[in-house]
Amino acid sequence: MGALAKVADAVIRGDPAQVAAFTREVIRDGVPPKEILDGGLIAGMTVIGDRFRVHEIFLPDVLLAAKAMYAGMDELRPLLVRDGIPSIGKVVIGTIQGDLHDIGKNLVGIMLKGAGFEVIDLGHDVAPERMVQTAVEQGASVIGMSALLTTTMPVMGEVVRLLRERGLAGEILTIVGGAPVSDAFAREIGADAYGFDAGNAVDVVKDLVGRR
Amino acid sequence: MRPLLERLAAGELLVGDGALGTMLLERGLAPGQPPESLTLKRPAVLEEIARLSLDAVADLLETNTFGGSPLKLALHGLEAETERVNGEAVRAVRRVAEGRAHVAASVGPSGRLPEPYGDVSRAELLASFRRQIAALVAAGADCICVETMTDLTEATLAVHAAKDVAPTIPVLATMTFDPTPRGYFTIIGVRVSAAAAGLEQAGADAIGSNCGNGVEHMIAIAREFRAASRLPVVIQPNAGLPRVVGGRTVYDETPEFLAEKARELVTLGVSIIGGCCGTTPEHVRALRAMVDAARG
């Protein structure tokens, strides 16, 4: 197994100590940080994402793989910063105000990070104003929102309204998701996109970033 | 009324009640507010809902304690109220049931995942469920309904907690499954056969499934439970998946549809049939009529 494949494999097995050790090894061997990121950490998470999509593995395996990926990222981040290597995009995510469910949102965050995005996770019960404010301050191009309650879903429309009011529509794009959320609902509130699950959300966010 | 376990052992077919959460929303529970907060402010609403279910001739009346574990209440800063929230909810239903229905005390997920993939230890989960269930039992619950579980570790800890606190109290334990091309799994990846084995081993008195994707999937899930275990099976489906139409939440499965499809559950030998999200007293009434007709 190649050195980068070993990193990817340790991510897939969800072993943080090994991912950190193998990542340090390839750094020491002079492999460029961007290659370690793409060919090691992201490659491993891509396999995890694919297996998750076809229900071969489930949430616990994804959470363990994510912890392992983060251990590698901790080693790699200083080098990525030093070399000025940007992420493929910055996304602000959160569960909307009034809603405390965050397993699905966390999963989307993991999959986005696993695909190379920089993710600012505001947690749950996030006020629309704070979503917009954070996206502006951090220079994020996408806001991802989720709602698990039919009662909190409409609050997501408030984020879309705020963006329009401030002339940010088209500059900061929105994607919505969550069990009771549908494509039709996304259109109804004027969101730019809908993701039906965490894997799909990554594809859609990639598309949004490309469109921008 | 004979004790619940005697009725189940005698092969009785019991009818559960409808959804509490959706009925509370219709009665002014503010979006985003925990249903448990209503227990302390407006216990009369709980009595009203219990009375509607009792009038529809439900054999079990569930309490407004789904999110009543201190770990879950902590999300709303209510964990110090654990004893009151759980105790008052049981007492409200007891006042209505008066020996005509079993007071089924609901125990839902903590909202946290166990280590190593989650951030809460088994000891913390067990302590949280023990504290909630102790309050439920002290207030006079007739049985404990561990429900909507997706993590088998958490579900079995809840069953253990109940048996620790009150060794003789009946425990019904149900999990929520989704259809996948590879069969039925919880979001955590638990198959029906694994759920049945784990819950039975933990000491549950009846096992099965609640919530989920409507009654038709429940027929297949019930069949798997029957194949995997000899314990009585509990099935409490949603009235389909929620849809939002013009800002209102709609569930598509009517009382007639539920009762018609639930005949299959009777044929499979399911012991308790009730409803979850979106079901109403009308659904309970339709189930009652079907069950009574089936059992002549």
Image: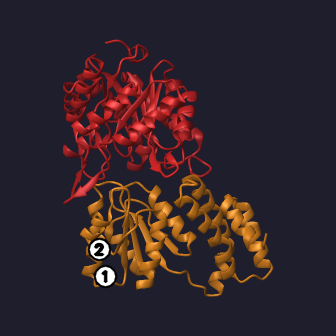
Chain colours: A orange, B red
Q: Position of residue B216 (x, y in %)?
A: 36, 41
Q: Position of residue B77 (x, y in %)?
A: 39, 48
Which residue appears at 19% of the width and 30% of the height? Answer: B52
Q: Nearer the viewer, residue B284 or B217?
A: B217
Same chain under badges 1 and 2? The reply is yes
Mark 2, residues whose alpha carbon is within 10 Å: few (<14), some, or many (≥20)? many
Which residue appears at 27% of the width and 68% of the height? Answer: A157
Question: For numbered disc 2, what is the local secondary structure?
Answer: helix
Task: Tell me if I can see residue A9 in this picture.
Answer: yes
Amino acid at pointer 2: Val
Q: Position of residue A16 (x, y in %)?
A: 69, 61
Q: Is residue B89 above or below residue B292?
A: below
* Residue tagged 2: A160
Q: Nearer the viewer, residue B184 or A84?
A: B184
* Residue tagged 1: A169
Are the two marked residues, 1 and 2, in contact with CB atoms closer than 8 angstroms?
yes
